[in-house]
Amino acid sequence: MKYQGTSAARFAKKPDPNCNLALIFGDDEGVVGDTATSLIKSWQAAGPSNTITLDEDEVKRDPPILFDALEAQSLLGEATIIRIRTKGEKLFALIKEVLAIAQDTPDRIAARLVLLSGTLNTRSKMRTAFEAASNVAALHVFADSDADMSDLVRVFLDSHAVAIAPEALSFFVGGLPGHRSLANAEMQKLAIYAHGLGRALNVDDVRALCETNADESSRVAVLLALDGHPGAAQAEMDRVIDAGFSAIGLLRLFEMEASRMLAAQAMGANSAGMGMKLKPPVWKSDWPAFAARLKKWPTPRLMRLVERLHDMELMAKSPGGAGMADAATRVLFTSLYTAAAGATRG
């Protein structure tokens, strides 16, 4: 059975009692991990259980490890929950066998199994098998939007009695596109720091405490490129490469900024006050730079950019496409700051 987005999150919190096998997959491994944790907690709430984590490579080398764990009956009556993080189709042959057992002789399956995976396209054998089988779940989860991330951070900080100023929350969230794992770690830092602080967290606190981007240089590089500053943009890009280049991460940052500029143009934003209505908002201090950027990137040009970014993200997600996407993204980066610099001179 297939579940996506919010329906996948709801299923994890309240799973079908007849479902003992689940595949959770998506672009953001942090969201995948949190959804798996939510599902496991729901299963644990149903009665005494023991959760074990199996290594994918070990299961591949010695399949009986998995089958023994799935079929073993606990002498104490505890349920066993098995967790495996897998990559693509590596375990498909074994999991296909497990699914066949679950369909034909379900009484043989005594444990519950959750598989965690990254991106699986619609041609994935693993994904297709789970979506087609009955009494199993394929949970397709997505990277957090800015609104999702804001809600996540706000709820977490509220639970720790920590206040955060709106501009600090926006600054924090703005550096976390598609990085739930990083967000979880950085929220913990904020909560520890703010304990007994006696005031709301501000932008300076967030800047001092957190590496809110997987690579903070990425966001700076994107803005410098769109602003048309070749030397500074390339210097930041060099830092991105040194820190661990991510084509997907950089493409999403470009797409986020292009989408914000398109929204500004659609609403005719011409003042800092209107900039506050954008998502994420453009703060008064950032408005002059944002307004100048808008002049370099009229709507038709931005639409072409968004289409190109979408095509490149699909390339990055295709089998064997990561290397090609890395090279193409570096070429795109150069072409963007060159084009913006030309617009500046014009």
Image (cartoon, rainbow, N blue to C red):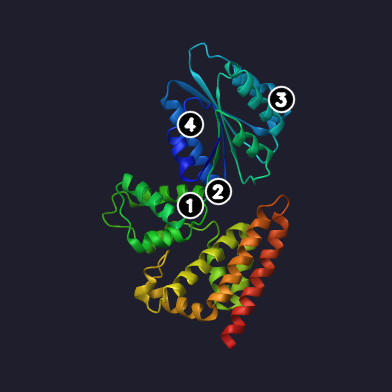
Element under disc 2: loop
Residue identified by numbered label 1? 144
Q: Amino acid at mark 3?
A: Asp
Residue 169, position in %: x, y?
Answer: 38, 59
Looking at the image, is mark 4 or mark 3 earlier in the sequence?
Answer: 4
**Nearer the camera: disc 1 or disc 3:** 1
Answer few, some or many: residues within 10 Å of disc 4's Cα (few below 14, many 20 plus, some between 14 and 19): many
Q: Which residue is mark 4?
A: 40
User: Label 2 sits on what residue type?
Assistant: Asp
| Dot 1 crowding, Cα within 10 Å, few <14, some 14–19, many 20+ | some
Q: Which mark is residue 207?
A: none
Query: Quick one: label 3 or label 2, which is nearer the N terminus?
Result: 2
Say whether disc 1 or disc 3 marks the residue closer to the N-terminus: 3
| Residue type (three-letter) at the residue carrying disc 1 | Asp
Q: Nearer the viewer, residue 317 or 127?
A: 127
Indicate the position of residue 23 as horizontal and vertical percent values.
58, 36
Q: State the residue position of label 3.
A: 62
**Residue 28, label in figure:** 2
**Residue occupying the far left of the picture:** 198
Locate the N terminus and report the quarter of the image it occupies: top right
Q: Residue at x 65, y 61 (%)?
A: 311
Q: Is residue 155 visible?
A: yes
Q: CA distance from mark 1 to mark 2?
A: 8 Å
Give the SS element for disc 3.
Answer: loop
